[in-house]
Image (cartoon, rainbow, N blue to C red):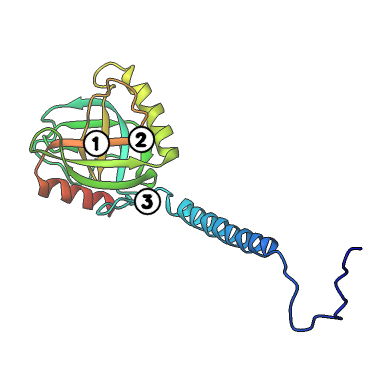
Protein backbone atom coordinates (compact mmCIF):
# COMPACT_ATOMS: atom_id res chain seq x y z
CA UNK A 1 0.00 0.00 0.00
CA UNK A 2 1.25 3.51 -0.93
CA UNK A 3 2.11 5.70 1.96
CA UNK A 4 0.13 8.93 2.12
CA UNK A 5 1.54 12.19 3.37
CA UNK A 6 -0.48 13.33 6.32
CA UNK A 7 -2.40 16.62 5.94
CA UNK A 8 -0.70 19.26 8.02
CA UNK A 9 -3.26 22.00 7.51
CA UNK A 10 -2.75 25.44 5.94
CA UNK A 11 0.84 26.57 5.62
CA UNK A 12 0.88 30.09 7.02
CA UNK A 13 3.90 32.36 6.50
CA UNK A 14 5.23 30.53 3.43
CA UNK A 15 4.07 32.25 0.22
CA UNK A 16 3.44 30.08 -2.78
CA UNK A 17 6.05 30.38 -5.53
CA UNK A 18 4.92 32.60 -8.39
CA UNK A 19 6.44 33.10 -11.80
CA UNK A 20 8.11 36.52 -12.20
CA UNK A 21 7.77 36.42 -16.00
CA UNK A 22 4.67 38.64 -16.31
CA UNK A 23 6.11 41.29 -13.95
CA UNK A 24 9.41 41.48 -15.83
CA UNK A 25 7.53 41.65 -19.14
CA UNK A 26 5.42 44.60 -17.92
CA UNK A 27 8.55 46.46 -16.72
CA UNK A 28 10.38 45.87 -20.02
CA UNK A 29 7.36 47.01 -22.06
CA UNK A 30 7.10 50.14 -19.90
CA UNK A 31 10.77 51.00 -20.51
CA UNK A 32 10.38 50.44 -24.26
CA UNK A 33 7.34 52.73 -24.30
CA UNK A 34 9.24 55.47 -22.44
CA UNK A 35 12.18 55.15 -24.88
CA UNK A 36 9.86 55.37 -27.92
CA UNK A 37 8.13 58.47 -26.56
CA UNK A 38 11.46 60.14 -25.76
CA UNK A 39 12.78 59.41 -29.28
CA UNK A 40 9.60 60.76 -30.89
CA UNK A 41 9.91 63.98 -28.85
CA UNK A 42 13.54 64.44 -29.91
CA UNK A 43 12.63 63.88 -33.59
CA UNK A 44 9.78 66.39 -33.40
CA UNK A 45 12.07 68.99 -31.83
CA UNK A 46 14.79 68.32 -34.39
CA UNK A 47 12.26 68.63 -37.18
CA UNK A 48 11.43 72.11 -35.97
CA UNK A 49 15.10 73.06 -35.61
CA UNK A 50 15.96 71.90 -39.15
CA UNK A 51 13.95 74.68 -40.78
CA UNK A 52 16.10 76.87 -43.06
CA UNK A 53 17.76 79.55 -40.99
CA UNK A 54 20.46 82.06 -41.68
CA UNK A 55 23.95 80.68 -41.24
CA UNK A 56 26.15 82.12 -38.52
CA UNK A 57 27.27 85.57 -39.61
CA UNK A 58 24.63 85.92 -42.29
CA UNK A 59 21.34 87.83 -42.23
CA UNK A 60 18.23 88.14 -44.36
CA UNK A 61 17.99 91.09 -46.74
CA UNK A 62 15.83 94.12 -46.13
CA UNK A 63 12.89 94.07 -48.58
CA UNK A 64 13.72 97.37 -50.28
CA UNK A 65 17.52 97.11 -50.11
CA UNK A 66 18.19 95.02 -53.23
CA UNK A 67 16.46 94.66 -56.59
CA UNK A 68 16.97 92.28 -59.50
CA UNK A 69 16.08 93.97 -62.80
CA UNK A 70 16.67 93.11 -66.45
CA UNK A 71 19.01 95.43 -68.38
CA UNK A 72 17.36 97.07 -71.40
CA UNK A 73 20.37 99.14 -72.48
CA UNK A 74 23.87 99.92 -71.25
CA UNK A 75 25.95 103.00 -72.14
CA UNK A 76 29.56 102.81 -70.93
CA UNK A 77 30.91 105.97 -69.28
CA UNK A 78 27.57 107.78 -69.78
CA UNK A 79 27.29 108.56 -66.07
CA UNK A 80 30.54 110.55 -66.09
CA UNK A 81 31.64 108.99 -62.82
CA UNK A 82 28.41 109.95 -61.06
CA UNK A 83 26.77 106.91 -59.46
CA UNK A 84 24.34 108.68 -57.16
CA UNK A 85 21.87 111.52 -57.16
CA UNK A 86 18.36 111.90 -58.55
CA UNK A 87 17.66 109.61 -61.49
CA UNK A 88 14.67 108.46 -63.45
CA UNK A 89 13.06 105.31 -62.05
CA UNK A 90 14.43 103.14 -64.87
CA UNK A 91 17.93 104.71 -65.03
CA UNK A 92 20.76 103.61 -62.74
CA UNK A 93 24.54 104.04 -62.85
CA UNK A 94 27.16 101.40 -62.22
CA UNK A 95 30.37 101.90 -60.24
CA UNK A 96 32.30 101.95 -63.54
CA UNK A 97 30.20 104.84 -64.89
CA UNK A 98 27.96 102.70 -67.13
CA UNK A 99 24.46 104.10 -67.46
CA UNK A 100 21.84 101.35 -67.37
CA UNK A 101 18.25 101.55 -68.51
CA UNK A 102 16.42 98.89 -66.54
CA UNK A 103 13.21 96.93 -66.80
CA UNK A 104 10.79 96.49 -63.91
CA UNK A 105 11.80 95.00 -60.58
CA UNK A 106 11.41 91.24 -60.99
CA UNK A 107 12.59 90.29 -57.51
CA UNK A 108 13.51 92.22 -54.36
CA UNK A 109 15.10 91.66 -50.97
CA UNK A 110 11.93 90.21 -49.46
CA UNK A 111 12.84 86.91 -51.16
CA UNK A 112 16.48 86.88 -49.97
CA UNK A 113 16.78 84.75 -46.84
CA UNK A 114 20.56 84.95 -46.34
CA UNK A 115 23.28 87.46 -47.24
CA UNK A 116 26.92 86.68 -46.54
CA UNK A 117 30.31 88.09 -47.53
CA UNK A 118 32.74 85.29 -48.40
CA UNK A 119 36.07 84.78 -50.04
CA UNK A 120 35.73 83.67 -53.65
CA UNK A 121 37.18 80.33 -54.71
CA UNK A 122 39.68 80.26 -56.23
CA UNK A 123 41.43 83.58 -55.76
CA UNK A 124 41.80 86.36 -53.24
CA UNK A 125 38.75 88.38 -54.26
CA UNK A 126 35.65 88.48 -52.11
CA UNK A 127 32.02 87.96 -53.14
CA UNK A 128 28.60 88.47 -51.62
CA UNK A 129 26.44 85.37 -51.59
CA UNK A 130 22.66 85.59 -51.55
CA UNK A 131 20.32 82.70 -50.80
CA UNK A 132 16.75 82.99 -52.04
CA UNK A 133 13.70 81.48 -50.37
CA UNK A 134 11.62 78.88 -52.25
CA UNK A 135 9.40 81.39 -54.03
CA UNK A 136 12.39 83.63 -54.78
CA UNK A 137 14.24 80.68 -56.34
CA UNK A 138 11.27 80.02 -58.65
CA UNK A 139 11.04 83.68 -59.69
CA UNK A 140 14.80 83.90 -60.21
CA UNK A 141 14.79 80.73 -62.30
CA UNK A 142 12.06 82.15 -64.56
CA UNK A 143 13.88 85.50 -64.85
CA UNK A 144 17.28 83.98 -65.70
CA UNK A 145 15.69 81.57 -68.18
CA UNK A 146 14.23 84.56 -70.05
CA UNK A 147 17.49 86.55 -69.87
CA UNK A 148 19.66 83.63 -71.06
CA UNK A 149 17.73 83.65 -74.33
CA UNK A 150 18.25 87.40 -74.90
CA UNK A 151 20.77 89.30 -77.04
CA UNK A 152 23.30 91.67 -75.39
CA UNK A 153 22.66 93.74 -73.35
CA UNK A 154 19.24 92.21 -72.77
CA UNK A 155 20.90 89.10 -71.40
CA UNK A 156 22.25 91.03 -68.41
CA UNK A 157 20.78 91.08 -64.93
CA UNK A 158 21.22 94.26 -62.91
CA UNK A 159 21.60 93.82 -59.17
CA UNK A 160 20.66 97.19 -57.72
CA UNK A 161 21.53 98.18 -54.15
CA UNK A 162 20.29 101.58 -53.10
CA UNK A 163 20.48 103.71 -56.25
CA UNK A 164 23.47 101.95 -57.78
CA UNK A 165 23.96 98.93 -60.04
CA UNK A 166 26.55 96.94 -58.08
CA UNK A 167 26.74 94.18 -60.67
CA UNK A 168 25.21 93.46 -64.06
CA UNK A 169 26.37 89.98 -65.06
CA UNK A 170 25.57 88.33 -68.37
CA UNK A 171 23.20 85.40 -67.83
CA UNK A 172 24.32 82.53 -70.05
CA UNK A 173 22.12 79.81 -68.53
CA UNK A 174 19.12 79.59 -66.19
CA UNK A 175 20.01 79.72 -62.49
CA UNK A 176 17.68 77.37 -60.67
CA UNK A 177 19.37 76.61 -57.34
CA UNK A 178 18.32 79.82 -55.57
CA UNK A 179 21.93 80.92 -54.98
CA UNK A 180 23.28 84.23 -56.31
CA UNK A 181 26.87 85.44 -56.16
CA UNK A 182 27.73 89.10 -56.58
CA UNK A 183 31.34 89.44 -57.75
CA UNK A 184 33.27 92.56 -58.68
CA UNK A 185 36.91 92.36 -57.61
CA UNK A 186 35.78 93.15 -54.06
CA UNK A 187 38.12 93.37 -51.11
CA UNK A 188 36.89 91.90 -47.83
CA UNK A 189 35.89 95.39 -46.71
CA UNK A 190 33.98 96.03 -49.96
CA UNK A 191 32.11 92.73 -49.69
CA UNK A 192 31.23 93.23 -46.04
CA UNK A 193 29.99 96.77 -46.72
CA UNK A 194 27.84 95.57 -49.64
CA UNK A 195 26.42 92.73 -47.51
CA UNK A 196 25.62 95.27 -44.77
CA UNK A 197 23.93 97.57 -47.32
CA UNK A 198 21.76 94.67 -48.54
CA UNK A 199 20.74 93.58 -45.06
CA UNK A 200 19.87 97.18 -44.18
Front one among 167 and 94: 167
In depth, the one of 85 and 50 nearer the eye is: 50
Alpha carbon separation for disc pair 2 and 3: 15 Å
Residue 38: give x, y in percent of width and height: 53, 60
Residue at the limit of the structure toward the front, as seen here: 1
Rendered view: 123 above or below 58: above
Residue located beneath label 3 in the image:
53
For the residues labelled 1 and 2, the Cα–Cα distance comes to: 10 Å
User: Is 105 in front, or is 114?
Assistant: 114
The residue under label 2 is: 178
The residue sitting at the right extreme is: 1
Identified at 67% across, 60% down, the residue is: 21
- Give me the residue at 89% from left, 63% from top: 2
Asked if the residue under mark 3 is in contact with the one under mark 1, i.e. CB atoms within 8 Å, the reply is: no
Callout 1 touching callout 2 (CB < 8 Å): no
- Left or right, 43 with respect to 59, comes to right
> Crowdedness of circle 1 by 10 Å Cα count: few (<14), some, many (20+)?
some
Q: Secondary structure at mark 3?
A: loop
Q: Position of residue 147 (x, y in %)?
A: 33, 23
Q: Secondary structure at mark 2?
A: loop
First in sequence: mark 2 or mark 3?
3
**Residue 4, quarter of the rendered image:** bottom right
Which numbered tag is attached to residue 181?
Answer: 1
Identified at 9% across, 36% down, the residue is 80
Amino acid sequence: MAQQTPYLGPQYGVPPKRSRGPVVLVIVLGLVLVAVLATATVLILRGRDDRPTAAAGSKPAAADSVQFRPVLSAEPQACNGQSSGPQAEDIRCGADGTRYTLGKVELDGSRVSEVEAAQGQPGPNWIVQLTLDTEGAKLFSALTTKLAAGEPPRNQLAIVVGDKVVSAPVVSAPITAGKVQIAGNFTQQDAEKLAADITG
